[in-house]
Image (tube, coloured by chain):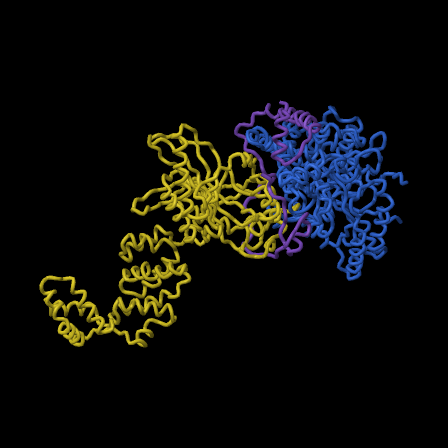
Amino acid sequence: MKISKQEVLHVAGLARLNIDEAMIDMFAGQLGDILEYVETLDRLDTTDIPPTFHAVDISNAFREDRIKQHLDKNEAVKNAPEEEDGHFIVPKVIE
Amino acid sequence: MDLHALTIHDAHELLKNKKISAKELVSSVIDRIETVDPVVDAYITITKEIALAQAEIADKTISSGKMKKLTGIPIAIKDLICTKGVPTTCASKILENFTPPYDATVMEKLNAAGAVMVGKVNMDEFAMGSSTENSGIKITKNPWEQSRVPGGSSGGSAAAVAADMCLGALGSDTGGSIRQPASHCGVVGVKPTYGRVSRFGLVAFASSLDQIGPLTKDVRDAAILLNAISGYDAKDSTSVDTDTPDYHALLSDDVKGLKIGIPKEYHTTKGVSADVLSAVQNAMAVFKNAGAKLVDISLPHAQYAIAAYYLIAPAEASSNLARYDGVKYGLRDSGPGGLIDMYKNTRSIGFGPEVQRRILLGTYALSAGYYDAYYKKASQIRTLIKRDFMRAFDACDLILAPVAPTPAFKIGENIDDPLNMYLTDIFTLSANLAGIPGLSVPCGFSESGLPIGLQLMGTYFDEQRILNAAYFFEQATDFHHKKPRLKIL
Amino acid sequence: MEFEPVIGLEVHAQLKTNTKIFCSCSTKFGADPNTHVCPVCLGMPGVLPVLNKTVVEYAMRMALATDCTIAHQSRFARKNYFYPDLPKGYQISQYELPIAEHGHVNITMEDGTKKRIGITRIHMEEDAGKLIHDPTRPVSRVDFNRTGTPLIEIVSEPDIRSPEEAGAYLRQVRSILRYLGISDGNMEEGSFRCDANVSIRPRGTEPFGTRAELKNLNSFKYVESAIAYEIKRQKMVIGDGGDVVQETRLWDSAGNRSISMRGKEEAHDYRYFPDPDLVPLVIDDEWIESVRKRLPELPEARKARFLDEYALPEYDADILTSAKELADYFEDCAKEVENPKIVSNWVMGTLLGLLNAEGKSIEESPVSPAQLAELLILIETSVISGKIAKTVFDEMVKSGKAAKAIVEEKGLVQVTDESAIEAVVDQVIDANPAEVEKFKAGNAKLMGFFVGQVMRETKGKANPQIVNKLLKKKLG
């Protein structure tokens, strides 16, 4: 099952990636190969097989509702690309 | 004496007996890094000042008689593990300038154990790859032959250990990323049971598969380092609250009566080089001669592991990497466009092609209409693979297999064919999908002198048993004594 | 053709735990920007979430209070999308296996009709941060203090059929949340949010029409207005021969209309999958029972008890139990006083009148239940009349003094001495012969005049019952 250029573009949009013309074809081809390979899974009948989402069987990992040390105000924004008065600054959505 | 060539346990004895100081040891390693790394390129950041300061503290600890097994021991840390105040790049442009304000839990443990961090080592970007060629920063060379890859994604860790640029290293393993580079570089690498070692502070690639583990010069060192980093962590909900045995103290080389499973699906000639086949066969003979029993077992769903893995891992990764958006930290491409353009430009410039490819694949596998056919289906296959192992361990104590189908390939050989690269993970992926522990121990060399590793896998939380078997094998052979001859300029 | 509206409501309530749902940062409002944060809620590389057990308890309380079935196993899922106030690029929520399902809420309309509104599900999730748009530059500011605050999402069945029913439902849900002590339920402050899904269909048919989602509903009033507007709008669209389009519409309270977001919003593909960093939540019957035992009395039960124990009319019981603090106030006062109806009259009338005029809540009442009780006992024991009591009450509010003290200070003790009153009555009758004539001729209304005169002479202190009795006796 090959993946179309439209689908690559759509998925790239969902993932917030720019794919230029040259890359679209390459990705479409590579992803198509991988997806074709992955189709081997269809050969297996998995009705009634429960999915495994966790490698080990644990449940109920909790913490108590107690306040712990916050990050220092400066530390929080230290790595920020743009910062002002303790706020993170981002460009607005352009309509 | 070349102090940098010591093992952890030998260095510990010398330190304990005051034959050498931590400062001398660490200085020797730093010198070695400065001499050799221009050729190997394993290090992204060398933390010389921090290391020397930690060495000084270590020497004081030693004098006060309170030293532990890792006090003063120089360790390299994969750049995927957060180190407070020290840049943690994940070998990606998108985090080139990121310095975490906190330590990973394993770092807190190493610090408490008195270990010395000599630097952060190279890897495939965000741990995605099997050769370290996907690093967004540099390409690491295999110390055994510098035109070849060290393996990946913990290529820097393996190369640093192999070239004596540290006494031990931490790496991470999601689909084989500790075991395979260990195999390619002739060192020991251990992937613990999922949940054995805390993931807090390990930058997530595929959360349900990732584990941190040691890469070392021999099995005793691996046991020591694994002990230091293991244990329940309340900050990691997937961490298991179970006791950690003292792997080092309990090391034993008795394999009489040990039942070693040989999965027929793995012991195939298809795609596997003759060198690897013969090394693994010889290893089987060594075990047999010492009284172990070789048992034929089957892992019927082994062939589906790659497909399942390359749906689950990219899916989780596509979500884990969504936080790299230029808002709070890391790279931002401040173009003229608005918010959406900032997201797209930042991520397209910041992520390399392999990372982008996996994000696309993962996003696709989770997208509307495809979730059932891809992610859910792969998760069901995962159940079948798990059941295969549970059944196998009814018939045997541990499983023996190759690590990689071939020794280290040449740099650039596989880079244009991602699917081909994925197929080389065939022997290692299943352990991650099931969550069981696995390790690689040197078991031979190719005709041209390239290292080959032997994989041993155990059942859940049974690291001791595979460490013991590996210890026996290592002591019964001398592969671990061989060192690469580096062509230093 | 007659159309009937079909309405479903999604409520998000912030839970008032001490810490956030997945990290130990404080949830307290009003801190400096980005000071109640840590690497976990900032979504830094390598961090992991750990579930706050109290959030689970609170969600269980709400589930039990709305008769939902609590799932023995539930899971957290990631809802993936990009927005600056969402640090991880996904929200941790619940998708396929929510903590509770299939409950209901009973509502009573203003005219007394009762109805049951179904609850489809309740699930836990984390709140996002705050995005403030700069008015002068093309930038926005992000404050992550609110990120990770625990929310429960309560989704109703599309059982609501009018804006009024919607209002009644929201008020009841909020009341329950406040009774349980798990949320402030304050729409203006953002601890209670509501989105509405509205569609219409020909009366008597079953299939649902296409629905529009209404957002930016910041008060109960706006919810009702927006729903009413939307029903009208959809009817007009269909009346004109068109089709209702599935879309999101933002309520513009200033313009009293909704604005379509169509074209501006992207089709969201949230790519839900189980969060691998969080393990399944297993709730056994024992845990459910222990939470159930510790549930406070809920509004419905409390109202029933008020009807029974205090023999109050339904109207009174409804108002008094509409808010827990009000019901508490009433009961604290009523336990001192003989007749609960007098308490109820004074609380609903005089006290709430004062509080509403000053924009105060019952918790801010200047008169405590015990202080009010003291005043009401003075009426019950005929020390003062009801009318005088009102002036005493005003003085209590103004000066903060106790009722007894004020009555003594101002000499307001009621005159109950019949002979003393009789003397005044005689005096008034003598002074107003013309009115006596008119009264005896049949103008019964003049009784009020005579009572007023006696009251004036006694400075309001004569016991009104005795005055009336004596006047009737003397005037016939």
Q: Nearer the viewer, residue B10 or B196?
A: B196
Tell me which corner region of the image, top left, top right, bottom left or bottom right, holds residue B346. Answer: top right
Q: Is residue A58 above or below residue C317?
A: above
Q: Nearer the viewer, residue A90 or B184?
A: A90
Residue C16 percent across, percent down from the top left: 49, 53
Q: Is residue B422 above or below residue B207?
A: above
Q: Which chain is blue in the picture? A: B
Q: Chain C's shade in the image?
A: yellow
Q: Nearer the viewer, residue C114 or B4?
A: C114
Locate the C terminus of chain B and report the quarter of the image it occupies.
top right
Residue C405 percent across, percent down from the top left: 33, 75
Q: Is residue C355 above or below residue C284?
A: below
Q: In this rendering, would C279 be left or right of C169?
A: right
Residue B207 percent across, percent down from the top left: 63, 40
Q: Is residue C117 visible?
A: yes
Residue B300 percent across, percent down from the top left: 63, 27
Q: In this rendering, would A89 be left or right of C7?
A: right
Q: Which chain is purple in the picture? A: A
Q: Is residue B394 visible?
A: no
